[in-house]
Image (cartoon, helix red, strand yellow):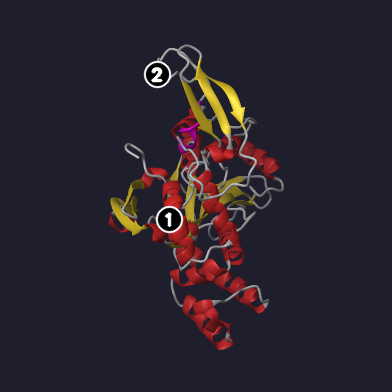
Amino acid sequence: MDGHRPEVADVFREFQAQYLDQWPASVQQRRVLQNIMLCKTSALGGHRAKCDQCGHEEFFYNSCGDRHCPKCQAAARAKWLADRASEVLGTLYFHVVFTLPEALGPLALQNKVVVYGLLFRAAAETLIRIAKDPKHLGAQVGFLSLLHTWGQTLQHHPHVHCVVPGGGLSPDRTRWIPARDSFFLPVRVLSRVFRGKFLAYLRCAFDEGRIKLHGALSELREDCQWRAFLRQLSSTEWVVYSKPPFGSAERVLKYLARYTHRVAISNKRLVSFQDGKVTFRYKDYRCGSLQRTMTLEATEFMRRFLQHVLPPSFHRIRYYGFLGNRGRRENLALARSLLAPGVSQAPASDPRTTEELTEQSEAQIHTPPKDQLCPVCKKGHMLIVETFDPPVTPVRALQPWDTS
């Protein structure tokens, strides 16, 4: 594979069997594993393109479309960003991050739907409650929340990113109340309220029997052990971080693009894959975001990646406040009219935003863009001359499908 850039799929294809022998895998994890291995291979069908001048031919294979696949996020991200362009308001935006403490990690992995759902709920209700308080902002805010479950080294690190316009609607909905340019809401207050809400909801979920405890966590089934666990969590500081605001519509969209439709690790971060080890780049935030490399055994790399597979139909992008799905269009129109009286149209966005993201994305590597020049003669254009379907026979994950 001289000149071949290492990919997550390469690791999966070579070490799938060893991984499944070493670690248990859910049905969803096995499905993600297979989808990533088969993505952009002949197993999923594709088409043949031919130069209209010199006759040079190339094959282009279909993508798997899995939301966990490093190659399949470009189209979904570009469409999502295009849809969001009309929803950006002409005001500063703030970025607030709510993080679960490390002690809750094992519990979250065993109860993803419940715990991640509570994380969304507690963070959203905290922002809405504190922003509504006249001592702070005194307004109804609207925002979107994005769930990430990983850190830079693929360790489990569940947190939600909330992107919030800097202000909100007054209680009587007749004014836009702006936040201060350099300050949104007090993070210490947000942290305490967030902790209280999350633990209250977690306690309720346990009482209702919605929390499953297995393996090393089985001792928490005892009521006294559970109460002690909650006391420990309530005695620690929970991390809520508010980043400085950012301005124009274009900057907001590009900023969002860094977080929406992101997977645990992109192929671009992989440095090498050899001798059963994977080396990848990461940012060391404890040292000023210094770029470092880490090397893991292939099966450990796979374990870290697959622990971030989300349950089926779980929504990792959600909207709250006046940006909630119900009434979003009307609320945006009202907010825009209050921000800029007499101007009813949506703010113009940079048309290059979506195009640049699409062109730079990994999903474009095997897809011939419209009017692509022939890579051989540099004069003709590659035209699709044949489309072929996936094999009729059942797909086998271990079959060495053509990826050339």
Q: Is residue 287 above or below residue 349?
A: below
331 magenta-colored:
no
- Residue annotated with mark 2: 376
Residue 85 on image: x %, y %:
57, 35
367 magenta-colored:
yes
Report helix, strand or loop for mark 1. Answer: helix
Q: Is residue 258 above or below residue 133?
A: above
Alpha carbons under labels 2 and 1: distance apart = 36 Å
The residue positioned 57% from the left and 49% from the top of the image is: 144
Query: What secondary structure characterizes most of the magenta part?
Result: loop
Q: Are marks 2 and 1 in contact (CB under 8 Å)?
A: no
Residue 390 on image: x %, y %:
61, 38
Which of the labelled discs sits on residue 15, or is there none? 1
What are the residue bounds of the magenta stretch? 361-368
Q: Amino acid at mark 1?
A: Phe
Q: Earlier in the sequence, mark 2 or mark 1?
A: 1
Front in this rendered view, residue 364 or 254: 364
Q: Amino acid at mark 2?
A: Val
The residue positioned 59% from the left and 48% from the top of the image is: 168
Residue 111 on image: x %, y %:
58, 68
Report helix, strand or loop for mark 2. Answer: loop
Pick out the residue farthest to the bottom: 224
Q: Is residue 277 something that shows in the picture?
A: yes
Front in this rendered view, residue 105 or 239: 105
